Amino acid sequence: MTELLPLAKSKGIGIINGSPFGSALLTDRGPAAWHPASAEDRAVFQAASEFCRKRGTSIAKLALQFASQNSELPTTLFSSANPESVRRNVEWHEQPFDMELVAVVQEILTPVRDKQWEY
């Protein structure tokens, strides 16, 4: 949906980015059972998660960094009931991320990129 960013900017509209973890699709634990992603789609996300783990990071960390450090998205919201998770996410946000890793993960996620989930 990033193709909407230039239009929003041209109209003076700021975008608030929500759910940088994609309803837990972009985490090592994966989404809840109720999530409408198919088994095939979940396998794509799992492959991206495995790739990140092999590279010494987590897909959640990469997802948060990618979302929260995008200068065209001044606000990124995430939810957590765990104060330690909030602290960890702030630490992740403050660390630089690897754009080459992002590019590879985006390639892995090509089959599910910009997919609209039927809730």
Image (tube, rainbow, N blue to C red):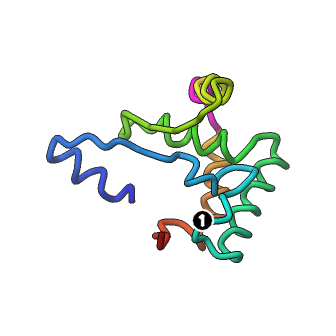
Count of all numbered marks drawn on residues in the image:
1
Q: Image height check: is 115 above or below 54?
A: below
Q: Amino acid at mark 1?
A: His
Residue lying at 66% horizontally and 26% vertically, measured from the top left: 88
What are the residue bounds of the magenta stretch?
92-97
Q: How dense is the environment of label 1, judged by Cα within 10 Å: few (below 14), some, or many (20 and up)?
A: some
Say which of 117 and 64 sits in front.
117
| Residue 38 image point, x, y percent | 64, 76
Q: Image height check: is 71 above or below 43?
A: above
Extreme-right residue of the structure: 54
Q: Image height check: is 4 above or below 59?
A: below
Q: Secondary structure at mark 1?
A: loop
Q: In the figure, residue 63 lies in which quadrant?
A: top right
| Residue 105 image point, x, y percent | 66, 56
Q: Image height check: is 44 above or below 50?
A: below
Residue 96 part of the magenta segment: yes
Residue 47 part of the magenta segment: no
Residue lying at 47% horizontally and 66% vertically, measured from the top left: 114
Say which of 71 and 116 sits in front.
116
Screen quadrant of the N terminus: bottom left
| Residue 110 image point, x, y percent | 59, 69
Residue lying at 61% horizontally and 54% vertically, measured from the top left: 103
Say which of 80 and 27 sits in front.
80
The residue that mark 1 highlights is 35
Q: In the figure, residue 50 lies in which quadrant?
A: bottom right
Say which of 90 and 78 sits in front.
78
